[in-house]
Image (cartoon, coloured by chain):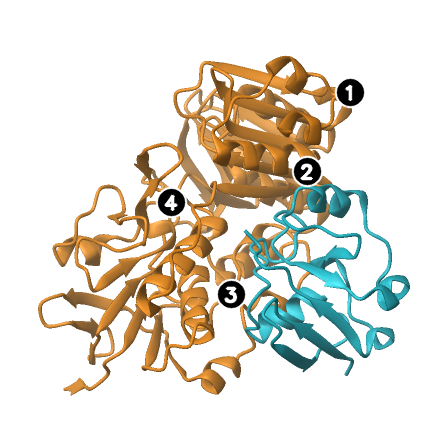
Amino acid sequence: MTETSPGVVIVGAGHAGGTVAALLRQYGLETPITLIGEEPIPPYQRPPLSKAWLKGEADADSLALKPSEFYAEVGIKLILGVKVNAIHPAAHTVDLSDGRTLSYATLIIATGARARALSIPGADLRGVLSLRSAADAEALKAALGPGKRLAVIGGGYIGLEAAASARALGAEAVVIEREPRILARVACEVLSTFFTDYHRARGVDFELGAMVEALEGDGGHVSGVRLADGRVVPCDVALVGVGAPPNDEIAAAAGLECQGGIVVDTQARTSDPDIFAIGDVSHRPLPHYHRSFRLESVANALEQARQAAAAIIGRPPPPHEVTWNWSDQYDIKYQFAGVPFDVDDMLVRGDPASGKFAVFHLTGDVIQAVEAINAPAEFMAGRQLIGQRRPISRTRLADTTVSMKEVAA
Amino acid sequence: MPKITYIEHNGSEHVLEVKSGLSVMEGAVKNNIPGIDADCGGACACATCHVYVDAAWADKTGAKSAMEESMLDFAENVEPTSRLSCQIKVTDQLDGLVVRMPESQH
């Protein structure tokens, strides 16, 4: 049976999907909007799941993107707990896991990414968790508390934020990382050292350059992480945070161009003009860098939601943004912008030991990326300068007695 | 519930009842009011929830933190009455508050 549903169908009710639906109504779209999500709850914010929410400082209402009654009020049809199994671009239809087929005039794919699972013995033990959804966060929170020990596999943002939150909840935490330093894929060495020291001073242990061979169990529940050197790191719960591959399989199967994510243009349009892809699942152009990349951040999801909504409604495209993100660990505000492509130098402004500094990555005298610790002026000015692509004085940038306003002037 | 008036840059007014305890930003975002983006969801990390608070309300909305001040320094079209609306908590005392939005948050 095919239900008649011309209009916009959005596959994936995460931060990107929920935002584009709301924006389309805000921009005045009058045709039907259907938002299909695999999770049983309406769109919510994921960033707090490893931060404020995990520490018990935020409730379900504050996580929700919009109040639950919002969708009916503005005429957005929510189909929750349902997956899209297939896209048929020629017929302009999608097949749902509940057996229905929906028609679309415009399709937006916002299926996000999924936590990468480990394929090692013991990965299916109880207490081996990942952190992507509210349900995942619920399970992790329930497993943490005084007397509990969390083993984090993977020293990325999710793992480090979870370790900080675990300490706030009174649990012990150990971070196990394959590379010789944490954040190896996403931050420079100065930052890795700063975060390692900061976590260590707050009771977090690190196993660096450590290969995980297996998870050991006791009665079907995880009890430790076995490393390649034979040692076993004991734990009551293990969090696996080793990256997130894109959920682009249905797009690839439908013949859309994919390349480690669904390839889109600067308007978030895929190789099919009636299909858009936004958020973590897309492989998008980065206009400031003349190349394409898959970004995993809320800022990216929202920017592409604005691009797609503007294109669908016929508004002028929003200005190109400089990619950015943030991380909260303990009392640290970490903000970073840009991507350090083709950089030939790195400049530290401020003293890392002071707990307030920024690392600038440059090509010649042009800033490509900035990583700022408790340094909002450096972050904000850096982000603007990255967008402007104009040379600055390195001497002045390195001199903290020269304000960022003056550096940027 | 406290009533807050949000005025878009084009003059459109939205009068909303916002629950005490939420931020002025959340009041706008949860009601899908245009003009306040709040990309970071209230973490004071992005400066995309910039508003102008009528001077008469400056005392009641409280002082800016150093973090907020630094973020605002680099936002567009900043004025002395500029605030990040994620940093203003709604209380009964703010009943009648009027905030205006800048031309753009990006």
Residue occupying the point 47% across, 68% down: A43
Q: CA distance from mark 2 to mark 4?
A: 28 Å
Quadrant where the C terminus of chain A lies? Answer: top right
In the picture, measured across the screen, residue A376 lies left or right of residue A342, that is right
Quadrant where the N terminus of chain A lies? Answer: bottom left
Instruction: Using the image, determine if residue B22 lies above or below residue A47.
Output: below
Q: Which mark is residue A401?
A: 1
Precedes in sequence: disc 2 or disc 4: 4
SS at circle 1: loop
Of residues B32 and A213, which is closer to you in this image?
Answer: B32
Q: Which mark is residue A44?
A: 3
Q: Which mark is residue A376?
A: 2
Precedes in sequence: disc 3 or disc 2: 3
Q: Nearer the viewer, mark 1 or mark 3?
A: 1
Question: How would you rate the neighbour count of disc 4 (Cα within 10 Å): few for under 14, some for 14-19, many for 20 or more?
Answer: some
The letter of the cyan chain is: B
Precedes in sequence: disc 1 or disc 2: 2
